[in-house]
Each structure stands twice: as structure tokens, then as C-alpha cells.
Amino acid sequence: MKDLILVTGGDGKFAKVLKSKNKILNFYFATKKECNILNVNSIEKIIKKTKPRMIMHCAALSRPMNIHEKDIIKSIDINIIGTSNITKVCKKNNLKLIYFSTGYVYEGIIGNYSELDPVKPFNNYGLSKLGGECAVRMYKNSLILRITMTEKYCYSIGKQGQESLGILEKSFNAQTEYFLKKHGVTSGMKVLDIGCGLGFMTQIIAGLVGSDGKVIAIDNNENQIKAAQARTPDNLNIEYKVHDIYALDAFS
């Protein structure tokens, strides 16, 4: 039988991906009930039961993103103390530890970061995951993976979806505005925003170019354009159009 890998957060998003993609490795997906990372005895119990050679630590508090601002105690408990407990148990039992961290530990401005780039979290979620990293790095038999999971667009969203989009908008607006200013978007410019989606960045650009400038925002999805128009204030100089980037020659 192949050596077993114990996965914490066995009922979470990363675990679901591993379950669907894995064809080779021998995983045991421990649920929250089976493995309470805030309780060292619970972690020891599941290790005794499964006898793994390695722990893949995926359990974490991530969404909704504003929970890390509203309840920092919960964020610290799960992402920092819980990860510290996993690290201590791995050390005690001489187990390899793979920790699923996040790209949110970076500033989020330039993109395409490497592990050699300096860390500078821009929100409490990033800080909490970096705190977990600090514990893991103290244990030499470990590996940290900074992973960012992308999510599919949903064109028809309910109240919870709208709230999530609002949280994302608040999280990224400051970094987006800084990036645009740094690369020369200023008052009076005329800007073409290709693939505008729901218009988050479009509105930031419009604010930077001001009333003397203009933003023409295009997307090939009519539903996206309608949603962007619906959420755009009247005082912003934005013209939305349904258009395909591959037909820009015909654009007018």
C-alpha cells in the first residue's frame, strides 16, 4: 500500500480539487469533525488512526474575506494558532509538512511573484496566512506552497454573491488605483478598457481620468456589460459597449 498523506480541511475547496484530480497519491481527507486543528489531542488522534507519512495542511479560514477584519480572534485562532498546532504535531511525530499558504502574502501590485520577493500583505487574511508561514518555517521538514485559487464568474448572483463582490472590490481597489497611477493613468486621458467585466477597474480608471477624460469599456459578454452599467454611478464618464477584442478594427 502507498504511503498515506493526511489532508486537513478535507471538506474544503482545495481538498475537493485534490479529490477530483488525484489519480496516483494515497490521500486521507480529514474533515473538521475528525481533525480539529485548535485541539492538539484531536490532531494526535487522527494521526494515530491513519498513520500518515506526511500532512498536507489545507484547513484554513478564507471566505468571506471580511471575516478577517470583523473577527480577528477567529482569524488568528484558525490560520495562525491552528497552523502552529499542526506544525508542533508534525515535529513531535517526525512528519513531513506541506502548508497551503496564499499569494495574498504579497502586496499584489506587480504580479508573477516568486518566493524570493518580499512579503507585504495588504489585508488581515494575508497577515493571518503569513503568521502561519512563520510557524511552519521554524520546522525544517516542511514545504510552503503559496497558492491562489481562482473562481468562476457568476453572472446571476444573489445577496451573498453581491456582498462577496463588494468585499473583493474593497480589498483590491487601493492596489489597483496605485498600479494605474504608477503606470501613468492621469486626468484628461481617454482610456479603452478591454474585457471590463463588471466594471470594477473601469470605475477606478474613470475616477483617475476625471470629467475631462473618458473611459470606453468593452466586453464580449452582454450580461457583464448590463451588470457593469447597473452598478456604475451617473457622474462617471464611462461608455460601455458589447464588443469583441478580435474585431477592434471595426470598433467605432
Image: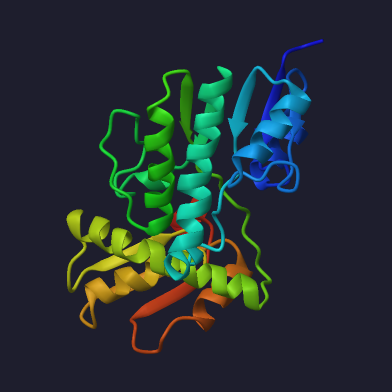
Would residue 49 appear left or right of 72 to someone viewing this image? right
Q: Inspect this view and state whether residue 61 appears.
A: yes
Q: Is residue 185 above or below residue 27?
A: below
Q: Quadrant of residue 47?
A: top right
Q: Position of residue 46 (x, y in %)?
A: 72, 33
Residue 26 against residue 99 in the figure, above or below = above
Q: Residue furthest toward the right? A: 1
Q: Nearer the viewer, residue 42 or 201?
A: 42
Q: In the image, residue 37 lies at what x, y percent?
A: 60, 43
Total labels drawn: 0
Image coordinates of residue 130 in percent, x first then y, are 38, 43
Q: Is residue 213 above or below residue 181?
A: below
Image point (20%, 61%), residue name: 181
Question: Which residue is outermost to the front?
Answer: 41
Q: Residue furthest top?
A: 1
Query: Of residues 240 and 97, which is closer to you in this image?
Result: 97
Name which residue lies at 50% across and 31% down. 87
Q: Can residue 96 be seen by looking at this rendering?
A: no
| Quadrant of the rendering where the N terminus is positioned | top right
Q: Nearer the viewer, residue 186 or 178?
A: 178
Rendered view: 128 above or below 111: below
Residue in the picture at 44% in, 45% down: 129
Percent x, y of residue 17? 70, 38
The colour style of the image is rainbow
Quadrant where the C terminus is found in the figure: bottom left
Q: Is residue 42 left or right of residue 117?
A: right
Q: Toward the viewer: 94 or 251?
A: 94
